[in-house]
Image (cartoon, rainbow, N blue to C red):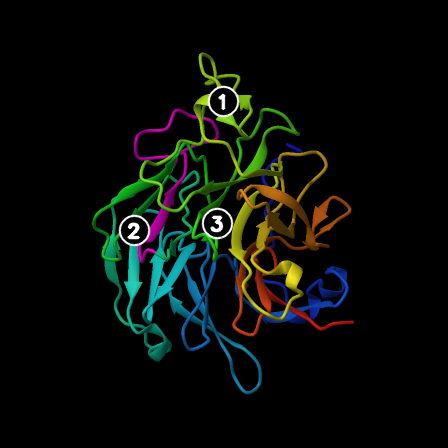
Amino acid sequence: MKLAPVSGPVLPTRADKLPTAMLHVPEGFKVEVFASGLPDARSMRLGDKGTLFVGSRVRDKVYAVVPGPNGNVVKVIASGLHRPNGLAFHDGALYVAELSKIWRYDNIEANLDSPPKPVLVYEDLPTDEPHGWKFIAIGPDNKLYVPVGAPGNIVMPSSRHAQIRRMDLDGKNVELVATGVRNSVGFDWNPVTKDFYFSNNGRDWMSEDLPNDTLHVVKAGTTTAPNFGYPYCHQGNFTDPEFGWGHSCDEFAKPAGLMGPHVATLGMRFYTGDMFPSSYKNAIFLARHGSWDRTKKLGGDVVVVKLKDDGTIASYEPFLTGFLQNNAYVGRPVDVQPMPDGSLLVSDDWNGAIWRITYKEP
């Protein structure tokens, strides 16, 4: 009972009650409130005209944060959806992924007050609730990428689960990008190599310290989907006590690196802006939502991940911390979104808020 899943506040935190003073960033950086009053704020995508779209996992809504003369204004642009966590934006259209369907809202930024009727893009997705919420994105190949999580903690997945798919923007020509993936809720492409990186949540109830959540990479030009081991192997070197019999971790693709046990690695983006110091250029900002099945909580932060020349992790270090106070959460980061001016946004579903991080040389 002490390790039951952590439930956040029912209502978003009032702007004047947000834990801004508790949050910490490196010297020269500043964290402030970008928007509040977005219940269950999750995945973020930026429109061509500066609108920030925000999905939700528990609620049924998609939000738009619109810049205004007196501050950012929050609007609801879609309701009645089932777990509309995943968002993508392309050619003026917003793609929204529910549990089992993907919709497209055309010319959305010109119609925020009266959104158009959505167009169904894809519906050949399982309806399982466990790990059913999606994170979607459109890659440099102009394809739509969609993960399908395992339908449970540690189960033998069907041929439709524990994978990442890609397809044309109209939902046709579906193919597999990766298999043996327990649950990915964040991915992006290396701006230099175009390699595909994704976060992955490890299994629960094996140990408080095993396995680690992981970061993986599929090299650009790979024609056969690599298998990353689930449910047989975890973190690239540990066979599962139930499903690992008769298997070796050497059969499967290795992770690019380990991100900590049960930290819930979620949204991630490569940073290509110019506001932050040059040491952050092309590094990965990754949100760790925070553990629940650990006696001593871990994560609940944003880390910056730097890569070696071979694409594996050279190091990762804390960047935005303070959401975990005295082994209890005062916020939980979900996704990150670099902005055109070089700042970085962080969504926080615990507080229903979006944080903005800027840099000015000391």
Corner quadrant of residue 321: bottom right
Mark 2 lies on a secondary structure that is loop
Residue 270: x percent and y percent? 53, 57
Q: Amino acid at mark 3?
A: Gly
Residue under pointer 1: 249
**Is there CB contact under 8 Å for labels 1 and 2?**
no
Q: Is residue 119 left or right of residue 150?
A: left
Residue 171: x percent and y percent? 24, 52
Quadrant the C terminus occupies: bottom right
Vertical side of 204 occupied by 188: above or below: below
Task: Answer with mark 3 or mark 1, whichever residue precedes in sequence.
Answer: 3
Corner quadrant of residue 90: bottom left
Residue 51 appears in the rendering: yes
Residue appearing at x 52%, y 35% in the figure:
255
Task: Answer with mark 1 or mark 2, whichever residue precedes in sequence.
Answer: 2
Residue 127 appears in the rendering: no
| Magenta segment boundaries in residue numbering | 141-162
Residue under pointer 2: 101
Depth-wise, is mark 3 or mark 1 nearer the camera?
1
Residue 308: x percent and y percent? 59, 45
Report the front residue among 336 and 6: 336
Residue under pointer 3: 186
**Is there CB contact under 8 Å for labels 3 and 1?**
no
Q: Amino acid at mark 2?
A: Lys
Residue appearing at x 47%, y 13% in the figure:
245
Task: Answer with mark 3 or mark 2, whichever residue precedes in sequence.
Answer: 2
Q: Amino acid at mark 1?
A: Cys
